[in-house]
Image (cartoon, helix red, strand yellow):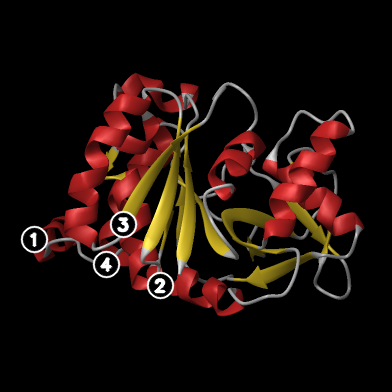
Amino acid sequence: MNALILAAGYGSRIAALGAPKPLVTVSGVTLLEWSVRQAALAGVRHAVVATGHRAAEIEARLPGMTFRTGVSLEPCRVPDWSLPNGHSVLAGASRIAGNYLLMMADHLFSAALLKTLVRDIHRARGAALAIDRYVTGPTIDPEDATWVRRRASGQIGLIGKHLAHYDAVDCGAFIATPDLAEAIAAAIVDGAAGSLSQGMQRLAEEGRADTVDVTGHWWIDVDDPRMHRIAEADAPFHLAGIPRELVRIAAA
């Protein structure tokens, strides 16, 4: 199974921690390596890593991550990483044939969540988004979240950061077919800035954007120092491979 991990952005809200966002550590492991480790548990064997801001530092870490996880990692530099994240999808997806697991490098996911999502890896068209119906959870930042309003069928009706009415939150993990990159490119041609959500909205309007309900599974968007503190406290209970002594410390 293939994956695309987006690790190109600047991460201004967490820049005070010093490292580029994908290399910020939680329980002694970088966010990017956690993405790779958890994806491996879900069956991923090869991943394209879209890089941009401080790309050389991130790319220098990839061989070590491959050695530790068994996942072959292919860097893909985004021509202009200041553009919305859909441009990272366009760059990375061009290196992948067929369907893939799409993840944000600044999100942490339990392996159980990803295993639930990848059951849809062989879908024939469009894309499927992992959604959480618990929209007021402590690991959700309402000022930064991407919201989802579903149709009665469970498909996405609307997706975006500024929805007035919604019933779920975007978890930041997708199953994508080649249709997703095509939808992002088409949205850009029509004048959109090129965000991933804009591509998903285009698929939604065509009835090709599904949801996978992962409510109850642990995940967090580590986007600022507050969420980083929560991740440090919660990760030992939800991520595989953390030393037992760290779990004992967290429980103390």
Instruction: Tell me whether circle 4 and circle 1 mark residues in contact (CB < 8 Å).
Output: no
Foreground label between 4 and 2: 2
Which of pointers 4 and 3 lies earlier in the amino acid sequence? 3
Q: CA distance from mark 3 to mark 1?
A: 29 Å
* Lower sequence index among marks 4 and 2: 2
Going from the N terminus, do you reach mark 2 or mark 3 first? 2
Label 4 or label 1, whichever lies nearer to me, is 4
Q: Which residue is mark 1?
A: 245
Residue drawn at point x = 60 percent, y = 43 percent: 89
Answer with mark 2 or mark 1, whichever residue precedes in sequence. Answer: 2
* Residue under the image location 39 percent in, 22 percent down: 15
Check disc 1 and give the amino acid type: Glu
CB within 8 Å, label 4 to label 2: no
Q: Residue 106: name its quadrant.
A: top left
In this rendering, the answer to whether 14 lies above or below 110 is above
**What kind of residue is marked 4?**
Ala
Pointer 3 residue: 72
Q: Earlier in the sequence, mark 3 or mark 1?
A: 3
In this rendering, the answer to whether 46 lies above or below 160 is below
Residue 240: assigned label: 4
* Viewer-closest of 10 and 44: 44
Amino acid type at image mark 2:
Ala
Image height of 217 relative to 184, above or below: below
Instruction: Name the foreground residue: 36 vs 218.
Output: 36
Q: Which mark is residue 42?
A: 2
Determine crowd level at label 1: few under 14, some 14-19, many 20+ residues with C-alpha closer than 10 A. Answer: few
Label 3's element? strand
Quadrant where the C terminus is found in the figure: bottom left
Q: CA distance from mark 2 to mark 1?
A: 25 Å
